[in-house]
Image (tube, helix red, strand yellow):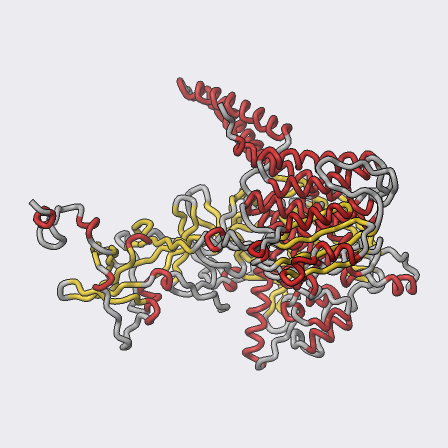
């Protein structure tokens, strides 16, 4: 029996792979979530945790999308609302509102920021080749936040650039 | 069984740096015939050499050996203590530090500087042989017998020298036959091992020959290789043997570190480099801290008490009856007391005497006064005052800047001083003391002081203030901290305190401190730095504004009071002033400044917390006064950004977050927003200095 024949017995990704270990064979993973009607996704390795909404402490004179800061196990974490940041409609805050906390390592420092989204939906596997460039046509979300688009079935998921998400506007005087 | 020596390296390094600091400070205070000091310097050098030998830091051993030899001569009285040697030894201490740091980090060091200094040392050692009969040959050091003329040779062979059958060693042996030979090889041209051709010669040499031979005779030695090398032959005069002349290192091609040299030549201030250095060191040192045994003992005692209290309380809890309530409360009180003391003691472990920051200044002033040609005396007070380690690390550079400015710009040249009937020697005083919960560091000089008119007119030229504005003295002095002042070179003609002062101020503010200037023309200036004792904890007053809770640092609070309607005045449009005895205190409504909904927007009958910052009193309008408590300061910058008027955040007992108010920042915020409002009304002319004051 030669080696090719042996290899033929190993299940390939997509057809009859062993359940639960598909993440070993596939590409990058992304956490998808819903804002209004659309699906967005961020690199899953940046996700620190997913929390429910609690009213944060306001930061004086902050931009509207900065909801305030919360105490996450002794760390002060700012909470940003993605709907407001992207200017897609007014959010409502209930106990079911979801906050995705993202940590971005940049050299020695790391930064942790929570983002308010409507709902978390799925984990998405996408190879680099699956990611398409976003066309530069309008839309509310500024281009530099968008890392690319991924087709999932009939729908399209927008991959967000975590680094860009973490950029903050300086405070202005009222 | 073999012992792993590497585990002792950190303590060797620590001791070495302490030894170097000791050598440096002793050298600076070294006086003629001071046997004791010389001995202690020698001992420090000796133990560094010994340790370095044990751990295989050969470069350190080699270099320190030269230093030790020189010191040994001084110790035995074979060599008189003179300023040139002391300077050379100070240089050597720098080199030793470089070498040890390089050994620690396994990094490169300034080879040119070390080579130059070791050459100078060798020269000086060789020169000492000029005293006939007094010199005994040291076993490890081929110091020459005492006769003849000194020659300095730079020998740079071409790469193929050995291929033509010549051997430098033979040449050197021939030279050694002529007299005593000191030589040092320059290894800067060595390629990496993979690029190395073993048949090529990458080295070059610096040689000092003490010999009665003529130039002709010396050149004859090199006759065979004349066309295959660069040879420089310089006859050294006795002065030159001490004074470092043009760096021979420059003559050598492929010397790796020439930028450092040229930076020196371009007159970059010494302290600039000095200022960079500790930062690197601090990062490395962050791992350990030396604590007095008494502090640790105290801590152990406190923990003992805590354990007793704990066992008492748990016994009480085993079969608790209401009748024991009193004992429970007293037990809890004791626990509170224990915890508080424990916290204080733990904080004290991080406290170091400020001499850690001050001890670099004697050297700095020594070097600067040499560079500027001004005689400056440095007086240090209060070096035992303790300060948190993190604060200490970060305050070093701003202090260096202030001291350098004081020498550079504060102290006038000797002629000017004499003309103004001042002593020729300038005086700079460093002082540190506690004031309330703060520490104050003063840097004062008896120099020319700051010329207010010149500062003001420069500020007007630069558009920092309006031409006709009238500023108070302290406001004028504060202008030197404006960023616009920092870049202007021509400012050095007014006592020029401008260079980089904005950075100094920023650094101090980042530590939660502030800086004040006092100056009297002709008499000198004082820079006063106020710093919090620790960055971690503060005593705070909790206040409520609307639904938000804020923490006001207790240290800023003058008093809290219920506003009385008849004491409120509205002036110049709609500015609120509260009459506090003889003072008129401007009222700052927090809700307005921070854009919040509040319980009441009426000042009448609301609560005022009178706070003071930078000599300015302000009444903060709040809805409610809550508890006073110690809060742990958490940075907002880590995950968010600096927010005007907020110095940080803290976590309250219930787990919620509260913002800590930054009083000076709030006052500035209020000024800015007032200026903005006025600008909107009256066009772009913001009226500086006419807001809250």
Residue B286's x, y, as percent?
55, 43
Out of B424 and B136, give the one closest to the viewer: B136
Out of B77 and B507, give the one closest to the viewer: B77
> At 61% from the left edge and 27% from the top edge, which residue is drawn?
B298
Residue B212's x, y, as percent?
83, 50
B311 lies left or right of B212:
left
Q: Tell me, yes or no, if residue B567 can be seen here.
A: no
Residue B436's x, y, as percent?
68, 45
If the image is split into quadrants, where does the C terminus of chain B sit?
bottom right
B575 lies left or right of B182:
left
Total numbered badges shown on the rendered structure: 0
> At 36% from the left edge and 55% from the top edge, which residue is drawn?
A114
> At 63% from the left edge and 48% from the top edge, which residue is drawn?
B98
A139 lies left or right of B244:
left
| Residue A58 placement: quadrant | bottom left
| Residue B267 placement: quadrant | bottom right
Out of B21 and B113, give the one closest to the viewer: B113
Out of B185 and B481, give the one closest to the viewer: B185
Residue A169's x, y, as percent?
44, 66
| Residue B38 placement: quadrant | top right
B212 lies left or right of B59:
right
Q: Tell me, yes or no, if residue B636 can be seen here.
A: yes
> At 57% from the left edge and 58% from the top edge, which residue is drawn?
B159
């Amino acid at each position: 029996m030669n080696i090719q024949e042996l290899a033929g017995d190993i299940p390939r990704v997509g057809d009859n792979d062993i359940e639960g270990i598909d993440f070993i064979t596939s590409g990058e993973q992304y956490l998808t979530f819903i804002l209004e009607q659309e699906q967005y996704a961020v690199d899953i390795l940046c996700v620190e945790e997913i929390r429910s909404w609690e009213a944060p402490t306001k930061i004086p004179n902050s931009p509207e999308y900065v909801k305030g800061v919360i105490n996450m196990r002794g760390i002060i974490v700012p909470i940003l609302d993605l709907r407001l940041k992207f200017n897609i409609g007014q959010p409502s805050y209930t106990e079911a509102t979801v906050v995705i906390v993202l940590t971005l390592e940049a050299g020695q420092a790391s930064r942790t920021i929570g983002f308010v989204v409507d709902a978390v939906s799925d984990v998405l596997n996408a190879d680099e080749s699956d990611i398409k460039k976003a066309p530069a046509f309008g839309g509310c979300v500024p281009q530099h936040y968008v890392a690319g688009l991924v087709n999932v079935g009939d729908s399209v998921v927008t991959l967000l650039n975590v680094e860009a998400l973490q950029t903050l506007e300086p405070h202005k005087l009222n | 069984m073999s012992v792993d020596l590497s585990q002792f390296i950190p303590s060797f390094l620590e001791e070495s740096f302490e030894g170097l600091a000791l050598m440096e400070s002793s050298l600076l205070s070294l006086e003629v015939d001071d046997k004791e000091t010389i001995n202690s310097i020698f001992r420090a050098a000796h133990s560094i050499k010994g340790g370095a030998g044990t751990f295989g830091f050969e470069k350190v051993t080699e270099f320190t050996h030269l230093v030790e030899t020189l010191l040994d001569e001084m110790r035995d009285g074979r060599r008189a203590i003179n300023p040139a040697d002391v300077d050379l030894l100070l240089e050597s201490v720098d080199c030793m530090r470089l070498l040890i740091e390089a050994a620690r980090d396994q990094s490169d060091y300034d080879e040119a500087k070390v080579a130059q200094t070791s050459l100078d040392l060798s020269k000086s050692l060789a020169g000492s042989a000029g005293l006939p009969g007094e010199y005994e040959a040291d076993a490890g050091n081929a110091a020459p017998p005492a006769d003849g003329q000194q020659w300095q040779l730079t020998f740079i062979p071409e790469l193929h020298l050995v291929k033509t059958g010549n051997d430098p060693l033979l040449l050197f042996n021939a030279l050694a036959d002529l007299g005593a030979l000191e030589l040092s090889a320059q290894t800067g041209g060595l390629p990496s091992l993979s690029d190395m051709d073993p048949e090529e010669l990458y080295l070059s040499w610096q040689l000092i020959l003490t010999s009665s031979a003529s130039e002709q005779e010396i050149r004859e030695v090199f006759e065979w290789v004349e066309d295959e090398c660069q040879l420089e032959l310089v006859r050294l005069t006795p002065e030159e043997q001490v004074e470092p002349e043009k760096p021979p290192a420059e003559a050598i091609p492929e010397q790796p570190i020439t930028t450092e040299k040229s930076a020196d030549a371009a007159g970059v201030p010494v302290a600039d480099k000095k200022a960079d250095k500790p930062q690197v060191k601090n990062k490395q040192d962050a791992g350990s801290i030396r604590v007095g045994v008494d502090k640790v003992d105290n801590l152990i005692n406190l923990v003992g008490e805590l354990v007793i209290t704990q066992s008492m309380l748990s016994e009480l809890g085993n079969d608790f009856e209401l009748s024991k309530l009193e004992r429970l409360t007293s037990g809890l009180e004791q626990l509170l007391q224990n915890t508080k003391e424990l916290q204080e003691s733990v904080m004290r472990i991080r406290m170091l005497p400020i001499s850690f920051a001050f001890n670099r200044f004697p050297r700095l002033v020594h070097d600067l006064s040499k560079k500027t040609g001004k005689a400056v005396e440095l007086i240090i007070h209060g070096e035992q005052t303790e300060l948190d380690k993190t604060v200490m690390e970060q305050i070093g550079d701003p202090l260096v800047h202030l001291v350098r400015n004081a020498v550079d710009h504060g102290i006038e040249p000797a002629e000017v001083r004499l003309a103004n009937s001042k002593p020729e020697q300038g005086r700079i005083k460093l002082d540190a003391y506690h004031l309330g919960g703060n520490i104050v560091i003063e840097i004062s000089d008896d120099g020319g002081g700051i010329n207010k008119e010149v500062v003001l007119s420069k500020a007007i030229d630069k558009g920092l203030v309006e031409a006709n504005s009238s500023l108070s003295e302290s406001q004028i002095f504060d202008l030197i901290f404006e960023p616009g002042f920092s870049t202007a070179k021509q400012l050095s003609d007014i006592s020029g305190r401008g260079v980089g002062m904005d950075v100094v101020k920023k650094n101090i503010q980042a530590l939660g401190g502030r800086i004040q200037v006092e100056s009297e023309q002709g008499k000198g200036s004082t820079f006063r730095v106020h710093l919090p004792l620790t960055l971690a904890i503060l005593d705070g007053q909790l206040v409520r504004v609307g639904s938000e809770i804020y923490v006001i640092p207790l240290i800023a609070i003058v008093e809290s009071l219920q506003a009385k309607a008849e004491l409120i005045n509205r002036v110049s449009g709609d500015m609120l002033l509260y009459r506090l005895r003889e003072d008129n205190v401007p009222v700052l409504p927090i809700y307005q400044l921070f854009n919040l909904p509040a319980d009441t927007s009426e000042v009448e009958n609301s609560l005022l917390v009178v706070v003071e910052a930078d000599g300015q009193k302000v009444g903060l309008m709040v809805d409610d006064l809550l508890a006073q408590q110690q809060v742990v300061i958490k940075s907002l910058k880590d995950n968010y950004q600096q927010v005007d008027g907020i110095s940080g955040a803290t976590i309250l007992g219930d787990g919620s977050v509260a913002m800590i108010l930054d009083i000076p920042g709030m006052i500035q915020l209020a000024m800015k927003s007032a200026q903005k409002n006025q600008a909107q009304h009256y066009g772009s002319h913001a009226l500086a200095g006419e807001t809250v004051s």
